Amino acid sequence: MITFLEGKLDHKQPARIVMDIGGVGYEVFIPLCSYDRLPPEGDTCRILTYHHITDSSQKLFGFFAEEEREMFTRLLTISGIGPKLAISALSGLPVRELKTALINGDVKRISSISGIGKKTAERIIVELRDKFSKGEQLDALAGGEGELGDTRLRDAALALGALGYKLDDAQKMIKAVAPKLAPESSVEDLIRLALTK
């Protein structure tokens, strides 16, 4: 398997690049989130890859960051989701937003991605929602629609977890009370309000 390519970026377009590695040009299909971070043509760069092999073809899919490749491979585990649709999902939403939408069960947000309808979005959520670690779920809570715009939501959910609440319940409790707090409110204020609601 080809895990990464490092060499000259010979050519780039929003959906594909050509890497010159020792005089051999490798065509690599990429999502928009990776394209935006590429250096100018002619510069040296390193691209993480996923080598997709079928009976009829071999294709390389490239990613600038490991989190993009991880999300791509997670999407491929779902029946009916191929590399083309997985790349489309990563092009439609940044990885963090996609994770947040999956963890929060936001069918509308996921079905807004080109090529993904409501039923496919529901299937993706059902199959992937519980495969994220607690840390990823808490990051999604803090970085999603976080009304406070910082890590206080995550910290408060962690504290409720330490008190014995399930993560899903802790997230719901925190999200329910977060809009009522002022920007200067502390994590303790958030926890107190969640416990008294």
Image (cartoon, rainbow, N blue to C red):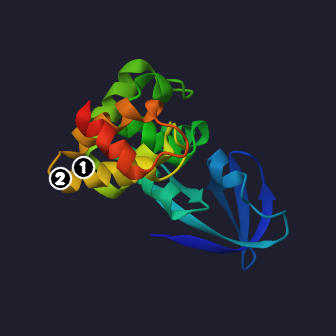
Q: Which residue is denoted by mark 2 in the rendering?
A: 163
The Cα–Cα distance between marks 2 and 1, rounded to whole angstroms, is 5 Å
Q: Quadrant of residue 126?
A: top left
Q: Is residue 149 visible?
A: yes
| Residue 162 horizontal side relative to residue 119, left or right | left
x and y percentages locating residue 100 in the rendered image: 44, 41
Q: Is residue 133 visible?
A: no
Label 1 SS: helix
Labels 2 & 1 near each other (Cβ < 8 A): yes
For mark 1, does the 10 Å Cα neighbourhood hold few (<14), some (14 to 19), or many (20 or more) residues? many
Between 32 and 106, the one nearer to me in the picture: 106
Image quarter hosting the N terminus? bottom left
Q: Which residue is denoted by mark 1 in the rendering?
A: 160
106 over 169 or under it: above or below: above
x and y percentages locating residue 136 in the rendered image: 37, 54
| Residue occupying image coordinates x 52% and y 42% | 148
Amino acid carrying label 2: it is Leu
